[in-house]
Image (tube, rainbow, N blue to C red):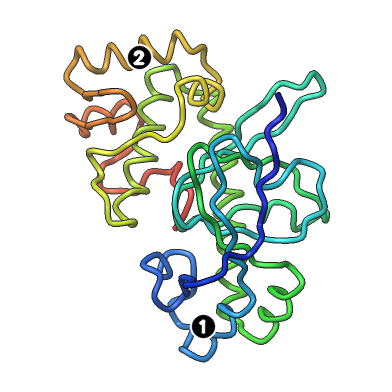
Amino acid sequence: MKPTPAAHAPIRGTQPHCQTCSLNALCLPLSLNDSDMERLDDIIRRGRPIQKGQLLFQQGEPFQSVFAVRTGALKTYTLASNGEEQITGFHLASELVGLAGYDNGNYPLTAKALETTTVCEIPLSQLESLADDLPDLRKQLMRTMGTEIRHDQNMMLLLSKKNAEERVASFLLDISQRYPRRGFSATQFRLPMSRVDISNYLGLAVETISRVFTRFQKNGLIETQGKEVILQDSDTLFELAGFNEEHECEFQNEE
């Protein structure tokens, strides 16, 4: 059954605003003054929550808006000619989604909600006009696109050179280093995606993912209960992933 696209009709009543949003320091340039922040806030559309399995946008659709995740999580993926998904990323609160369509005018990916998710929709035409007046906003958009490109390059390296344990360790560290910036623990967190999605993203069989998780638990590296994960030995995970703990994880999706 094909997922239904999410409706973006505005919600009447009290609405969150950029100035009071706890995530604004993550998805917006910090140098915007109150007046500029209000101008940005005026063009943002805030629709009803997207339910699990609903699509935010589809591959091939005209690129009309950029979205900032407020709550929940999304996955993005491409569809092969045979209809199979290839997951390209997971997007958590404060992260921008949809910028990949900027260069050719169409979304090259599909975005689907992994759980009940709310987003801020920023129409492209109004965003471009505002960015012309606000250099810091344009710089932020360019920085975000550059981060996405770097992450894609790192993902190619991950799939081509690392074994199963190294891929899973890299994935867990990536997620762990994205949560603290949202006020959550880096060592105890919930994975909003299924193991099927993780296996697709990492280019591994689901059974391999399960075996690696089990091995990590037996070796005292992690604890899991459902989708909850506790990192018990981050040092060893960093070694497996080929990272130095003093440096940021190279697979992090944002700066």
Residue shown at 66%/78% (left/top)?
Answer: 131
51 above or below 87?
below
In the rendered view of the protein, which quadrant contains the N terminus? top right
Name the secondary structure under disc 1. Answer: helix
- Please name the amino acid that badge 2 sits on: Val
**Marker disc for residue 37:** 1
Write down the residue under mark 2: 212
Residue shown at 23%/47% (left/top)?
Answer: 185
Q: Residues within 10 Å of mark 2 (few under 14, many from 20)?
A: some
2 above or below 253?
above
Residue shown at 29%/52% (left/top)?
Answer: 180
Residue furthest to the bottom: 35
Towards the viewer: 203 or 230: 230
Name the secondary structure under disc 2. Answer: helix
Q: Residue 159: name its quadrant.
A: top right
Residue furthest to the front: 13
- Please name the amino acid that badge 1 sits on: Met
Residue 88 % position (x, y): 60, 36
Q: Residues within 10 Å of mark 1 (few under 14, many from 20)?
A: some
4 above or below 194?
below
Residue shown at 56%/69% (left/top)?
Answer: 12
Residue 211 % position (x, y): 36, 9
Horizontal side of residue 112 vs 117, given as left or right = right
